[in-house]
Image: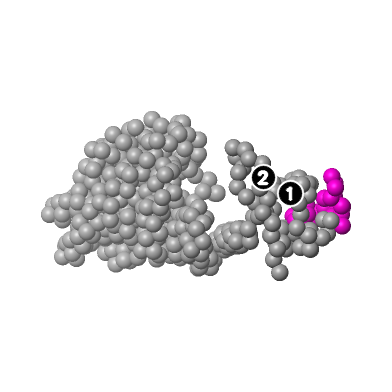
Amino acid sequence: MSHSVNIHPPFNHTASRTLTIEQPAFGKRVRERRRVQGLSQGDLAGEGVSSSYVSLVESGHRIPSLKAAKVIAGRLGVTLEELSEPEAQDKQRTHRLELVGLLVAARSSQLAGDWSAARSQLETVVRQAGDGGFDEVRWEARWELATVLDRLGADAEREATLLELLHDPITAAAPLMRTRAAIELADLYRRTGCLSESVTFAEDASGAADTLDGARPERIQAQVVLLTAYVESGEWHRAKSLGDALLQEVPSVPAEQQRACALWAAAGARHLGGGSEALGLLAEADALLGPADDVRLRIRLGRARALLAVSTGDDSAPALLDRVRLAGALDSAPAAAAWLAALEALAAVAAVRAEEAPAATAAAAADALDPAALPPLDRARCTVVRARARRAAEQEAAAAEDFKAAASEYEKAGAVRLAMETWRELSTPGHVTGIDPHAVLMP
């Protein structure tokens, strides 16, 4: 049976509400806190409160007076309000602890590589936190869920989760959170071949990042994702100026991975602007990435270096291609095989043009290349490579089909400039002269 008494604290500017001491709930909270702190009932006694009195309070058989309640609270090192919370607030606190426990379990699942379990746990947190009004817990769970969905390749669900985050009131009130969510959306749309949306969210991220402290890594991340969006959508005049500005900031960026990405993105802009230092910038970026950095990022950077080196006929091409071969031997994913085949085909084309190999070499390389497993922009790039290999093998009809397919893929993604360059190459038999826009692989 529950008993309660209302206690009216002396009026002041910060406490004028009535506290309700409910028994046995009050005694239960006293006992739980005392045991957690390793105290005895005697340790709570003092100023007219005996250990037997404490025992009666803890068992719920005595409703303490205001003076006795303050003595007990003081001995426990808590406020009287904390011990006098209504039962509903106790349940709410317990529910919060349960949600936090699920968050911790989801992080353990991620560390173990069990992404499906992590997804299930985080979706439970999102659902239950929303029902219980724990907005900040739901925000954190959604943010982690977006990462897990990325690992699972669930792009549609990840898009929906990120859009919910972006429109969350917590995000709207915090430029840092808005920057992060917009960066992730810009990157997702770029990877899935929606470049118009990628530019929109990249510009949103950059605008929000302008209000952040200069030392925040998100400022550089926002510039990198915007530069990448400009390069791939064909806005190369904007890319050049942004790349130049980004290079000026690189020395002040504390995190090596952030500096690497900035150098990498700027290298792409420099190459398209006619600069000759792109390979050097990519080498600097590669030197900054260590074993603890994102494996997928390091593998992609290795491909970017090899692609540009082979395309430009640089002396470093054989060694860089060997590195990609080694990485491919450790990665059984279809995308890894497709990229390796594309680089081998590009090398075969160079050998045929230099009269160092027969046309059959390019034909075999073209037959081994299947870009289907790649995301839209990478698929278009590698389809161009296959078209060049077929052209080098004097298979003009098949080459034309590949050029048309690549141009269509670029157009569908919104990479109009790259589509135009592809159509131009189709209509001009022979090898590419000048800057090769398909040789740029961004972060």
Q: Position of residue 222 (x, y in %)?
A: 38, 42
Per the rendering, the mark at residue 142 is none
Position above or below: 290 against 388 = above
Query: In this rendering, would 55 be left or right of 420?
Result: right
Say which amino acid is labelled 2.
Pro
Task: Return the residue at label 1.
Answer: 66
192 or 160: nearer the eye? 160
Residues rendered magenta in the picture: 30-52
196 or 313: nearer the eye? 196
Query: In this rendering, would 216 be left or right of 381?
Result: right
> Tag 2 or tag 1, which sits nearer the N-term?
2
Task: Return the residue at label 2.
Answer: 9
Q: Position of residue 298 (x, y in %)?
A: 46, 50
The image quadrant that residue 261 belongs to is top left
Spatial CA span between label 1 and label 2: 8 Å
Q: Position of residue 287 (x, y in %)?
A: 48, 41
Q: Position of residue 193 (x, y in %)?
A: 29, 57
Which quarter of the figure is the N terminus placed in?
Answer: bottom right
The image quadrant that residue 365 belongs to is bottom left
